Image (tube, helix red, strand yellow):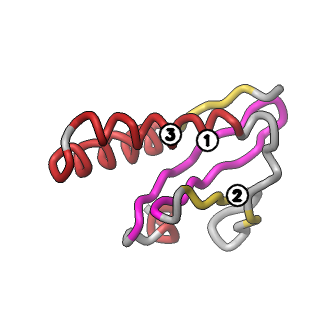
Amino acid sequence: MPEIVFASVAMDDLDGIYDWIAEAAGPDVAHAYVTRIRRVCMSLGQFPDRGRQREDLSPGVRSLAFERRAVIAYRSEGDKVVVLRVVHRGRDLQAGFEE
């Protein structure tokens, strides 16, 4: 099974999502939400091709919707799956790849 690796910008995305939710709904809710996102990311090792192909973002990128509120962008790279971005609703995923 491929190793799951989080790009540093994806970790920053998760931190930002946590902070935003913690401020609005409290740290317990934020922790539970981010934990669910991470669980889905970790499951990509079992089915790395299940997301939608997103060649418009970058070659080999796939995206997976999470609870209709976030998008997980990732790339399968041989023996690993790299989580590239985790973008919460209302943010532009395309812009995240242009930065």
Residue lying at the far left in this picture: please name it: 23
Asked if residue 14 lies left or right of residue 3, the reply is: left
| Residue at the image point whose x is 72% and y is 26% from the top | 3
Q: Is residue 70 magenta?
A: yes
Say which element carries label 2.
strand
| Residue at the image point whose x is 74% and y is 58% from the top | 51
Q: Amino acid at mark 3?
A: Arg
Separation of residues labelled 2 and 1 (CA atoms): 16 Å
Instruction: Specify few, some or many for label 3: CA neighbours under 10 Å numbering under 14, 14-19, or 20 or more.
Output: some
Residue 30 in the image: x percent, y percent?
31, 41
Q: Which residues are magenta?
A: 69-89
Please name which of the two marks, 2 or 1, marks the residue nearer to the observer.
1
Q: Amino acid at mark 2?
A: Val
Q: Out of 79 and 33, give the one closest to the viewer.
A: 33
Asked if residue 12 lies left or right of residue 83, the reply is: left
Residue 75 in the image: x percent, y percent?
71, 48
Q: Are marks 3 and 1 in contact (CB under 8 Å)?
A: yes
Query: Where residue 61 is drawn, which disc sits there?
Result: 2
Say which element carries label 1.
helix
Residue 33 in the image: x percent, y percent?
40, 43
Residue marked by disc 1: 40
How many numbered markers are drawn? 3
Instruction: Specify few, some or many for label 2: CA neighbours under 10 Å numbering under 14, 14-19, or 20 or more.
Output: some
Q: Is residue 81 magenta?
A: yes
Q: Amino acid at mark 1?
A: Val
